[in-house]
Image (cartoon, rainbow, N blue to C red):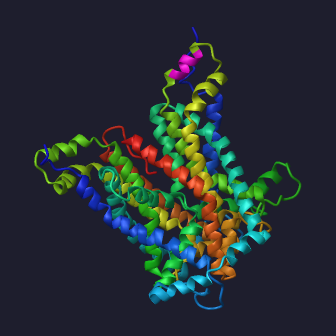
Amino acid sequence: MSARFTFTRPARLAAIAPYLWMLLFFLVPFGFVLKISLSQTAIAQPPYVPVFDLTQGLSAINGLAELSLDNFRLLVSDNLYVLSYLRSLAVAAVSTSILLVIGYPLAYAMARLPRRWQALAMMLVIIPFWTSFLIRIYAWINILQHDGVLNKFLLVLHLVSAPVVWLSTDSAMYLGIVYSYLPFMILPLYASLAKMDPALLEAAEDLGASRTRAFWLVTFPLSLPGIAAGTLLCFIPIVGEFVIPDLLAGSNSLMIGQTLWLEFFTNKDWPVASAAAVALLLLLVVPLALYDRLQRRRLEQAR
Amino acid sequence: MKPRTVHALSRFNVVSLALGFAFLYVPIVILVIYSFNASRLVTVWGGWSLRWYGEFFHDRAMLEATLMSFRVAATSATIATLLGTLAAMALSRGGGFKGRTLFSGMLYSPLVMPEVITGLSLLLLFVAINAERGFWTVTIAHTTLTMCFVAVVVQSRLGSLDRSLEEAAMDLGCAPARAFAAVTLPLIAPAIAAGWMLAFTLSLDDLVIASFTTGPGSATLPIRIYSEVRLGVKPEINAICTVMIALIAVVIVIASLVSKLSSDRGENAAPL
């Protein structure tokens, strides 16, 4: 028995290449973000004063004295940043709630379709996820613009007397976010609802529970893991969203992803952009850790 | 006797399905229809025409960006598939090795990490090591993101495999490498293919990470489209988008055919 081959050792060796890759291109870059967030802005190329340089050896430690928390102080003291953080959280919370309200009935109906149709329905949900994000937002600009399809439709039906301004409003942004993230909400919900044993519902109804009551007592609690997964899968990326608010929302209040982009590309203030990234990451640590745990548990169950 | 209501679709279910799918598809259909509009004004219908497709195929900058996007997508998807499959093997067959928690954490975080953070951090790395920004920096950035998706797709397939097959091969004296090539690899091939296609389309789509990591003169297609869209709706963009949608539809059809051909049993791995 002891001489038997196993996959364990070679599988561990397989980890080496991806491990090194992720260390180098995922973890180490965060070190740079942290480092530059602590340095001063400079008008130079690249536009920051290096804080410490490992090539200087021990003398680099002296450089630590020049570390500054100025950028973080700026983040806290400047209303622009605090407001855009709060706005990001609010937008993500509202959108995730809308997604849940729209996604749940859809996922529920999908799970009750005949088996043959379920695969097709699932495919239909996934296809938009494969089409480009940018294209989907652009499709909505086509519809929502001043003389777009929606306004024409409303005018023809005499529901409005003059074209309504849809673009550059918060409603357009929410519409775009809900549209883009709907597949991310539906799939985990559907996965948990489809696994459910229909006999449980029959039992509840045989025991005299009304349909509504059976839903709240049986179906809903059993779908909670799906709700948690869908919520995290949508909430976390929406907080850092850039493209949708940039193209669909007005420019009077920004989300943190936009602020970061602006600092970086327009103001060329890399240290402040880095500090904003660090703060955004700290904001997301709790939901990220939750997501990580959930993901691991799911994969362990799959085994 | 109570009627069996559990399996039947209620009216509410049917309405949710109809509205839900209409919501998902109507905008794309409208976009495609307007790409065939002869009028320069996007909103005035001037009859059917292929005029804007002609404009696209004569727009050098757009064509170059398209070519760049396809080169990046093909290269990064290939590297990501290789690394992601190795990572999936390590996680599902490697047991509890040292540093496993960090490894899986690094693999799952990019799936939901806001793109602005990933893009910014990679750019700072490239600047620090003085890498010339262009094709390779975008490719590396996309590989980092998409290998995580490949790892998840392949890992879920590995998790649902019957391990006794590969164990039997090794009990019969197959070295692990041979057992992998003869037993495991053919079984996970559909997931690997799905992973490659997912990586390819994700790379083709990406705007934010590419904007951070690219250099002057090497814009990808989403970067070009984005700068045009900011200036307003142009019928040429509708045509480009329609071409992209058609391409992705072809990829999906191939993907579903591949997975249908190779997954004879009911358990087909979803592309997500």
Which picture quadrant has residue B100?
Answer: bottom left
Q: Nearer the viewer, residue B113 or B24?
A: B113
**Residue B211, horizontal then vertical, whole percent:** 57, 75
Which quadrant is the N terminus of chain A positioned in? top left
Q: Nearer the viewer, residue A18 or A209?
A: A18
Q: Is residue A199 magenta?
A: no
The magenta stretch is A200-205
Q: Is residue A202 magenta?
A: yes
In this rendering, would A37 be left or right of A300? right
Residue found 59% across the figure and 17% down from its top: A205
Instruction: Tally the numbered discs.
Output: 0
Residue B57 drawn above or below residue A186:
below
**Residue A222, horizontal then vertical, whole percent:** 55, 32
In this rendering, would A281 be left or right of B43? left
Residue occupying the far right of the picture: A161
Residue B77 drawn above or below residue A269:
above
Which picture quadrant has residue B238?
Answer: bottom right
Residue B65 drawn above or below residue A105:
below
Residue A275 drawn above or below residue B175:
below
